[in-house]
Image: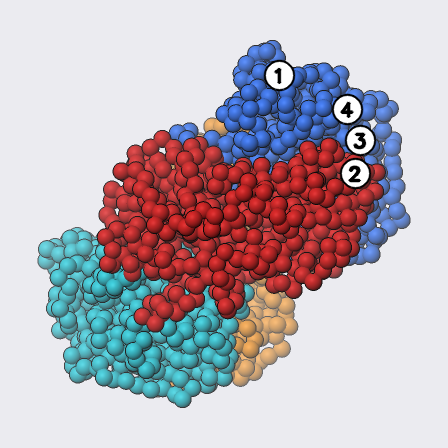
Chain colours: A blue, B red, C cyan, D orange
Amino acid sequence: MSRENFDKLGEECGVFGIYDFDGNDVASTIYYGLFALQHRGQESCGIAVSDTNGPKRNVTSQKGMGLCNEVFTPDSLQALKGDIGVGHVRYSTAGESVPENAQPLVLNYVKGTLGLAHNGNLINAIELREELEKTGAIFQTTIDSEVIAYHIARERVNTSSIEKAVARAMQKIKGAYSLIVMSPRKLIGARDPYGFKPLCIGKRDNAYVLASESCALDTIGAEFIRDVNPGEIVTITKDGIQSDCDLCIPKEKTARCIFEYIYFARPDSEIDGVGVYHSRIQAGRYLAQDSPVEADLVVGVPESGNAAALGYSLESGIPYGTAFVKNGYVGRTFIKPGQSSRESSVQIKLNVLKEAVKGKRVIMIDDSIVRGTTSDRIVKMLRDAGATEVHVRISSPPFLWPCYFGTDIPEREQLIAYNRSINEICEVIGADSLGYLGEERLSQMVQGLPICKGCFTGEYPMKPPTRDIRGNFER
Amino acid sequence: MSRENFDKLGEECGVFGIYDFDGNDVASTIYYGLFALQHRGQESCGIAVSDTNGPKRNVTSQKGMGLCNEVFTPDSLQALKGDIGVGHVRYSTAGESVPENAQPLVLNYVKGTLGLAHNGNLINAIELREELEKTGAIFQTTIDSEVIAYHIARERVNTSSIEKAVARAMQKIKGAYSLIVMSPRKLIGARDPYGFKPLCIGKRDNAYVLASESCALDTIGAEFIRDVNPGEIVTITKDGIQSDCDLCIPKEKTARCIFEYIYFARPDSEIDGVGVYHSRIQAGRYLAQDSPVEADLVVGVPESGNAAALGYSLESGIPYGTAFVKNGYVGRTFIKPGQSSRESSVQIKLNVLKEAVKGKRVIMIDDSIVRGTTSDRIVKMLRDAGATEVHVRISSPPFLWPCYFGTDIPEREQLIAYNRSINEICEVIGADSLGYLGEERLSQMVQGLPICKGCFTGEYPMKPPTRDIRGNFER
Amino acid sequence: MSRENFDKLGEECGVFGIYDFDGNDVASTIYYGLFALQHRGQESCGIAVSDTNGPKRNVTSQKGMGLCNEVFTPDSLQALKGDIGVGHVRYSTAGESVPENAQPLVLNYVKGTLGLAHNGNLINAIELREELEKTGAIFQTTIDSEVIAYHIARERVNTSSIEKAVARAMQKIKGAYSLIVMSPRKLIGARDPYGFKPLCIGKRDNAYVLASESCALDTIGAEFIRDVNPGEIVTITKDGIQSDCDLCIPKEKTARCIFEYIYFARPDSEIDGVGVYHSRIQAGRYLAQDSPVEADLVVGVPESGNAAALGYSLESGIPYGTAFVKNGYVGRTFIKPGQSSRESSVQIKLNVLKEAVKGKRVIMIDDSIVRGTTSDRIVKMLRDAGATEVHVRISSPPFLWPCYFGTDIPEREQLIAYNRSINEICEVIGADSLGYLGEERLSQMVQGLPICKGCFTGEYPMKPPTRDIRGNFER
Amino acid sequence: MSRENFDKLGEECGVFGIYDFDGNDVASTIYYGLFALQHRGQESCGIAVSDTNGPKRNVTSQKGMGLCNEVFTPDSLQALKGDIGVGHVRYSTAGESVPENAQPLVLNYVKGTLGLAHNGNLINAIELREELEKTGAIFQTTIDSEVIAYHIARERVNTSSIEKAVARAMQKIKGAYSLIVMSPRKLIGARDPYGFKPLCIGKRDNAYVLASESCALDTIGAEFIRDVNPGEIVTITKDGIQSDCDLCIPKEKTARCIFEYIYFARPDSEIDGVGVYHSRIQAGRYLAQDSPVEADLVVGVPESGNAAALGYSLESGIPYGTAFVKNGYVGRTFIKPGQSSRESSVQIKLNVLKEAVKGKRVIMIDDSIVRGTTSDRIVKMLRDAGATEVHVRISSPPFLWPCYFGTDIPEREQLIAYNRSINEICEVIGADSLGYLGEERLSQMVQGLPICKGCFTGEYPMKPPTRDIRGNFER
């Protein structure tokens, strides 16, 4: 259930905003929206709401460590009164999580109260902080959102509207961000010019919705309107949606994080016109074309490998099957076996369906290998269950480079592909053969959408920071 | 994740016991064993351990409401010292759950301390309680385990061993039970003569294990030895395993609960020689043979419908696919939408992969329909996502009768199949066609194993109680 | 605030029962009653209620570890529906406390459901347990209440009423007990023949109340009716109060625990006709008569030494004053300073009013010294604050003997008075002089009431058990 | 226990800081210091520590709602590593408390990290906020501390040291404040020029301590050095204590809050050279001189009335006694009786010692009457207990005016003394006579120290704000 249990990458956040023109309370809808985005962050979550007909300094919020259904109760949602609101789920990294960093950020500024939720990583946050501090600013958190908020507040002083202040702030902040800002009477969504992180617009009755992924719209019964474009600022008021695309760059220069399609996003989401499920099916098909192998069964490592496995099966004609049962009760408080224990973390979470694999040549599809700490165990489990051959296919290229835009990739030295050939990796994980998705396939799997694939190639859409920003501040 | 979230039946419990002859502490292994059995009960859980080399009145236990990883912590497991132990997970029914009823039951009796964990339902528990009360007995819980414990304790007074006392007690108790008893120096497993509920034996190094399902053995890295036979009592001591089969009845009279194969058990378990996954694949194949229909895609309602869907696909040649994404974060404390809410419980937990079903004729496989409260929503969701036809196939016959042996079937009047023809049900759920598994297929899907299928046929292996036992005591 | 924070003795419990003939819910009144008795036990508490007009097997209860206001909430009290009920607070001893032992005990027996709350210690509990176990009884707790309940249930089988069953049970159980039993239609109070522990009767409107101490009656606005007599059984039904005194012994043979007057009971309680406050004032007066000393100020160690200090002052004419400020926020979860810390537990809880004692000869009154672990610190604190002399007077004799009747006296070797003369003790605690209350004064301070003073004299009203019962079972 | 349980005024906070030159961890000492200051605030508390030898952006903190022993655990204190630190306890007002407002405030600014704890109320906070916001500042809390922090950070940009920045900030902020600032290498204490709120300096071994009250020094075993003077800034570094008194005003213009002496401070504290206990004794003596009455007994309403009662007794010769027993278990989660309940909040918390007052003419001393909501109940309780006369004496003048400096005085209309003569108040509370302390006695009771007595006289040491600041922001 919780993604960090396997050898997977972590992302930062999910955001959700809503403005109900009929004046209905929105907190419980935000709750269900966040619930649909929970896969994007399990460390902490929060909701802030405001009454657009009330005073301008009037926000109620609740934040806490844990999953949505741990933090909120029916009573606490009931207490969050307001027809406009913003919510946030935050990614869990071990140890460095503190309650202060939970979002949305709520703050008083010159024009009232702002709520702000943010997904992504700025690459010039440190410089911006230092600059601000030199003018006397104080920071109470270590999240980029506070830097963004500061810039918006400063710009607002000499700007005629909050959306213009957001636009000016966006000229200064650099990096990946999808942003929702709630002002006393407006809900604003913005996406960085490269469009690293997704953000879409929905509508339900007389309410407009902003969400990281379209699956959150389905969950609350809202209709998908469109994606916020890279670089676009949308301003939702009672007069409708206004769009500002001054910061938009040519589409071919945009750079969606390809890992959203490979792993982060829920398969039932559609991002910038491309279905996530479809792109994974495609990746599987490409693998079948590029790395064919004779076998009796194609299986996915649950959950994220299943779609690519189906694609591989469809393309190759080799039957698709289920080889693993995943224990659905692994929660945040999962107790990990000690060093001396006979039980292993992998085995506790995953078991092989012996009857499904016994005596068979198995193609096992996974979406990625990061450190490789679990792949060898899973391959061994298949063999122990009687698989005669185990061929591993990975629906992404090997990780080799850091990400500066919000994906939590470990130190290079910890990456299994660092300084190893495919054959060497194959040996480490004990497979009979190993195939990765070719880098050139990435763009194809998303129908030619411009993407960022820096973690595979080391080439980034914008110049990476000269000093390593990772670890300086809590991410 | 939590089973009660859909229109599913509930079962009572999972049990786990271990005796480590090398004297190692067993609590954390019990924890992982229970974790593997969590699908059998999410209301409460407990562990009791004892030191076989210590005094005879020496048991440490911890019980609590909630999932294993909510109740136990590394510290609390550490505090449970002992080389023999028993654990239990309990099924959650709404409202009537009380901490007092958590198991294992721990009690002092004439020969020291007993720990007792039990899965199943006695049909003469009320009579036995009344009989005992007439002799001055007091009851502190409303669980059958206390009745069983009482009988064992009474028989022990004039019996030479605990296993003989268990045997004598089993002559009095009637119904379904799989039982683990921990005495100061022995671990005992017993199964009722009909074998309604599963129980198997495993071994890891120098430790013997008893568990409701074999998946728990895999999880802790133990080897499967064999099932406890219906009616058998196995006694595990440092001298090995002793078997008493005096109460065993002819195999053809035994009556395993078929619903373990259809839904309760984890697919990676094997019960009495028949793999659960395989039996579900078979059920799907039979459905394809018996209720064929032209279509483009076969999908399962996750998780329990997936195996039968695969079977249907394999038999029919119609491609298998994934149509649903299940939110993996629905926990025990899931907040249900209120009546007036636009959000529905089903939609929050399940979303359709539009791109997978759009424009397709879909066969949707589920394991059962109980009240039918969610089937119509799911069918509608498929249609809304663009499916041109939705054919529903159910991998079990219609529910029509009560269960007296531990399965929580609602009042007859609430069952969708009660007083309705297949066509009428089909109309209620809005499908284009509907097919159930034929009753005669049940025995076939488990390779001819003798089974209880009373909930489908109204014919039970033993005379049901004349007064309704359900509701008299908390189940 | 919490008594265990100083070098004090611990007692077992407080009990409270109520039957409201007007049919009002009684749970919240029990809550306030227990709140008034909280000084008698801080480990756990519980409430069980029943509806006398409902079915006979119909009890709702809630129990938990901690103080009343930690265990109960407005909602949980609301959920406890019933016009008859019983409550309990339990004394906290370190470590051995388990939730299972919380009271009241609720049990099903031949005639329906019983609730039972009990204060005191049986001296033949082990024998009785063993006897019962030999007939097949099982025990799920280690509290005496379960033994009592068993006897009541067994006797009830061949007895015409619950009160007669209680009477017969009382012929078998030996030791100290004040007991409240709630049956489906009756509230019963009983006190052991010696009357070790207090129990009194009150009335509020159309409701009768039983409580360990009269202060609980004041708190809920009930009128004090009378004490239950030693050996008496009172049965409260809609027909009024019935008394059974068959087990009563001559008053001169009764034996109230004198420590209730010295320390346990709240000063605003009156037990068997003698006010606790008054008896403490008297103790102080006797100390002034028997251990006079020239001084400028008499002070009490809060809270329990204050009344005796006032008595000493009144008798001696030496001005009474306040020398200590006690931190009122020491709760159950108080963090104790580590060994290496500069802070001491005593100093954190107690501070001296320097200006009150500076340059003065101070008489410091405390109710008892058990191990003496804090007295020396307090004396030193007075000296550090400028007291020129510190004369310690103790309003009870030296502890020298074990108690078998419910008071938690440490091992003899740990008692400061064991094998030490008064002068030696005086030296240990660093006082200028030390005086204890003479043993002959004990009876006088309670106006000649027959008392048990075994912990001072080693002479007990009934033969103590030959084997040490302490430690065998949880106390 | 908790002060808000009676009809008392509330104050804001207690502060504590320490710098250990030997490099020892200070968190647990801060904990005990806060514990001693708990009476100054029970809503929330927090500790922030830093390692003066570590990097400049290096603070660990923990904050939470509740009492110190609810918020902190041995483990969480252990995790707070650092040799310099600051702590805070915050006053609880109903409803408006939010976790965000807990202190100390921790923030990153141009020179590293600051920790800031503050007691008092600024009267120009709104203006300062607005001013700052106009320059683009954002506020994440509604506490004055954030305003102060902002000013310090801004001034620090063009100032050579943190203490100079504090000094400059103090030129802008107006009102009452005692302040502790922790910078990476310095611990700074400051008191507003009027000295409304107390702050003192202590020393323990090689560590310097700052605390709201001297009782906190006693508790941790530190030696009292001196008070921080009104208007003074003390800067503690490894080079010792530096004092800056540029903002100090002539002593006769200073204005200590007299209510610290009357009620807020712990009696064992000494503030600006005057013992709190002594001042209360004096108040009692003055009452005896100014409002004499014939009676048999003088009693205090616990705890705060006791010292004045003793003073009254000493002066009048009428014996001092104890009339009330206060339940020590009233915690934060105290369940208040509902409207319909027979139990009253007062009676549940306070009981009368009947035997002490029966047949007696009683003088009852309390420190103040605010709304008068409990006084009548207490007077009635004394009468019900048999007191023949009840004469009430109040050791402060009648409340008539608002406080702008941090004391939580209700709306004027709710004050019992508003628009009522002494006789009328006497009638309302049902006393036989009533006497207040004369306003002229206030200065005398603190040995002529210049004080603020605005709440009694409406005359304030500085011009009160023209618009009501109360309610605008959290108080």
> Crowding at label 3, few (<14), some or many (≥20) Cα neighbours within 10 Å?
some
Mark 4 belongs to which amino acid?
Met
> Separation of disc 3 and disc 2 at Cα?
26 Å
Image position of A290 (left or right of D196): right
The residue indicated by pointer 4 is: A445
How far is mark 2 from mark 1, CA to CA? 35 Å
Q: Amino acid at mark 1?
A: Leu
Badge 3 marks a residue whose secondary structure is: strand
Look at mark 2 in the image and give the residue it sits on: B295
Count of numbered tags: 4
Q: Which residue matches tag 3?
A: A274
The residue lying toward the viewer, choosing from B380 and C303, is B380
In the figure, D76 relative to B222: above or below? below
On the question of residue D101 being in view, the answer is no
Are circles 2 and 4 on residues that touch, CB within 8 Å?
no
Chain label for disc 2: B
Instruction: Decide if residue B33 is in sight here.
Output: yes
List x then y, in percent, for residue A116.
Answer: 72, 42
Q: Is residue B382 left or right of residue D468?
A: right
Chain for disc number 3: A
Can marks 3 and 2 be said to lie on one chain?
Answer: no
Displayed quadrant of residue A11 = top right
Are discs 4 and 3 both within one chain? yes
Do the residues bearing badges 4 and 3 touch, measured as CB atoms within 8 Å?
A: no
Q: CA distance from mark 4 to mark 3?
A: 9 Å
Type of amino acid at the residue the image marks with label 3: Val
Tell me the element at label 1.
strand
